DNA sequence: GCTAATTGGGCTACTGTTAGACCATTGATG
DNA sequence: CATCAATGGTCTAACAGTAGCCCAATTAGC
């Protein structure tokens, strides 16, 4: 951890890949995080290209790749578009070990550490802020929706709940960081079997997080998020051995 | 904060600009954060181009731009290279209002919130980890170096201290996020006059942060970092009126 | 001095990316 | 059943970025 470490941090690659690859990753993020729910469609190509800051040609290449990979169904004509056909894979216990192995030890611990830091930070910041009634209602609403969720909507609404915390801080940078952190573990989360006992446990932890935030208790919020994430992290780390 | 907010978070621009612009930003980050200290030189072009994942042509354009802007002195031949000539501008109280105004209210609050979250998160994560003797020594060493720093080295060593906390977590993602957060406020920090009373105050807060981390107290570490950053944030926010 | 190694400076052919225009398809609506 | 607006599909010319090569300058060490 001498100065050369900092050199590597700052002088890292400027671009993660070419425009096509980065676009595929971004669209996959929108799909896997459930930002665009299954059955819904992406914005029109012309609009999306502007939002992503790329040309329509490059965007179309990325959409084509996701179509070939089975994530999208593209239909022409008015009321057409690129419809999301992806549904999270059914959790199978055999998958987890493979998914963890695919990711690599270093990347996994990095992602888990990053997620722990940014989500704890976001919750603490939000708890320290003065919230409007609308913000409190939204947070409670996301929690209620998650508690009522069926098994097929659970992951998507869980993501929505967690990301809401970062979004409510009003910091786009923080929301982006949390979305990025979540994406890096989403494949792993999808491979974890959803046992009722775990869901109940998570539900209590979610309640604790919301309670601490609404009570304006930053340290309680940080601790509640840390405990919540540590459960998942410990489970995943167990598969590294 | 409905779903369209999340769409904007995920479907943001894939690239912040062209390769040239992003490279200029990255090199500026290395210079302004003091990763490459004044008088030292950047790595050779061929090496740096590989590290940054761009072609030498594009890198040279960026170096040329920084040369024209007075940040670098480029010398040919063996033992030549791109030498950093930049020194942080002397703090002048009149500058701060202009620098804050240049940045814009939204960007400033976003950056301050982001920094608060990631630095608090990093400190809490590090405090929760089991540290080796080497890691403890490095943290103490950075703190000691900062306390002994002259006024011309203060900002650079302050940056080094803060970034060390994130780097010691072992998460490259977290280190990158903290470096990014720091860069976004570096122009502002440089414009703040360094009064002895403030430096003494900061020194005590730095001691508290290190003490909490070494004591394995995540909530104390979070609180110490939050108090430390809140002082700066409050000062900057006062200039928004 | 000469030499040799290292470094910046510059060129060219090739590929990736863009902007903008125009075509093709679809389906709700009159 | 004809219309038409919204949407994906395709093409072209121009620009941005890359890889690889060779030239030019500098200086420590012989």
Image (tube, coloured by chain):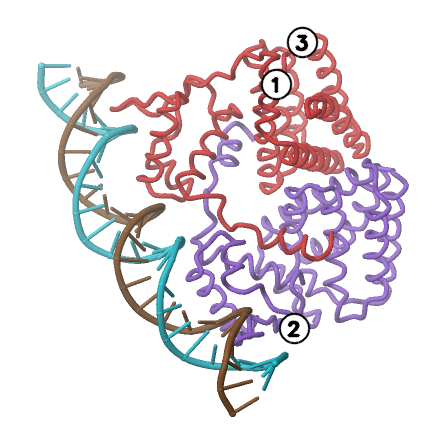
Chain colours: A purple, B red, C cyan, D brown
Q: Nearer the viewer, mark 3 or mark 2?
A: 2
In the displayed structure, B80 sits above or below A146; it is above
**Marks 1 and 3 on same chain:** yes
Query: Where is residue B140 shown, x and y percent of the image?
Result: 67, 21
Nearer-N-terminus badge (1/3): 1
Label 3, residues with CA under 10 Å away: few <14, some 14-19, many ≥20: few
Query: Where is residue C21 shown, x and y percent of the image?
Result: 36, 63
Q: Chain of mark 3?
A: B
Q: Which residue is mark 3?
A: B195
Q: Are marks 1 and 2 in contact (CB under 8 Å)?
A: no
Front-lying residue, B42 or A142: A142
Position of the N terminus of chain A by quadrant: top right
Residue D22 lies left or right of residue B196; in this view the side is left
Circle 1: element type: helix
Q: Are marks 1 and 3 in contact (CB under 8 Å)?
A: no
Q: Chain of mark 1?
A: B
Query: Where is residue A223 shown, x and y percent of the image?
Result: 83, 42
Q: Residue A39: which disc?
A: 2
In the displayed structure, B164 sits above or below D21; it is above
Q: Which residue is mark 1?
A: B96
Residue B241 visible somewhere in the drawing: yes
Q: Nearer the viewer, mark 1 or mark 3?
A: 1
**Marks 3 and 2 on same chain:** no
Gap between marks 1 and 3, in whole Å? 15 Å
Position of the C terminus of chain A by quadrant: bottom right
**Quarter assignment of residue A83:** bottom right
At x 70%, y 35%, the residue is B113
Circle 3: element type: loop
Gap between marks 1 and 2, in whole Å? 51 Å
**Quarter assignment of residue B218:** top right
Q: Nearer the viewer, mark 1 or mark 2?
A: 1
């Amino acid at each position: 951890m001498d100065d050369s470490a900092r050199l590597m941090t700052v002088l890292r690659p400027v671009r993660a890949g070419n425009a096509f690859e980065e676009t595929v990753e971004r669209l996959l993020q929108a799909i896997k995080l459930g930002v665009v729910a299954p059955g819904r469609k992406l914005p029109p190509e012309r609009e999306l290209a502007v939002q992503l800051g790329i040309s329509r040609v490059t965007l179309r290449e990325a959409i084509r790749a996701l179509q070939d990979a089975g994530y999208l169904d593209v239909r022409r004509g008015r009321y057409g578009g690129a419809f999301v056909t992806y549904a999270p894979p059914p959790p199978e216990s055999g998958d987890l070990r493979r998914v963890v192995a695919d990711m690599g030890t270093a990347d996994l611990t990095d992602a888990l550490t990053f997620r722990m830091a940014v989500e704890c930070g976001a919750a603490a910041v939000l708890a320290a802020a003065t919230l409007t009634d609308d913000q409190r209602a939204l947070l409670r609403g996301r929690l209620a929706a998650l508690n009522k969720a069926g098994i097929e909507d659970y992951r998507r609404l869980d993501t929505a709940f967690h990301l809401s915390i970062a979004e409510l801080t009003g910091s786009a940078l923080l929301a982006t960081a949390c979305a990025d952190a979540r994406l890096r573990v989403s494949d792993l989360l999808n491979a974890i079997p959803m046992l009722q006992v775990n869901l109940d446990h998570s539900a209590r932890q979610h309640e604790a997080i919301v309670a601490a935030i609404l009570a304006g208790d930053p340290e309680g919020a940080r601790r509640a998020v840390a405990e919540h994430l540590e459960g998942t992290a410990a489970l995943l780390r167990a598969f590294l051995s």
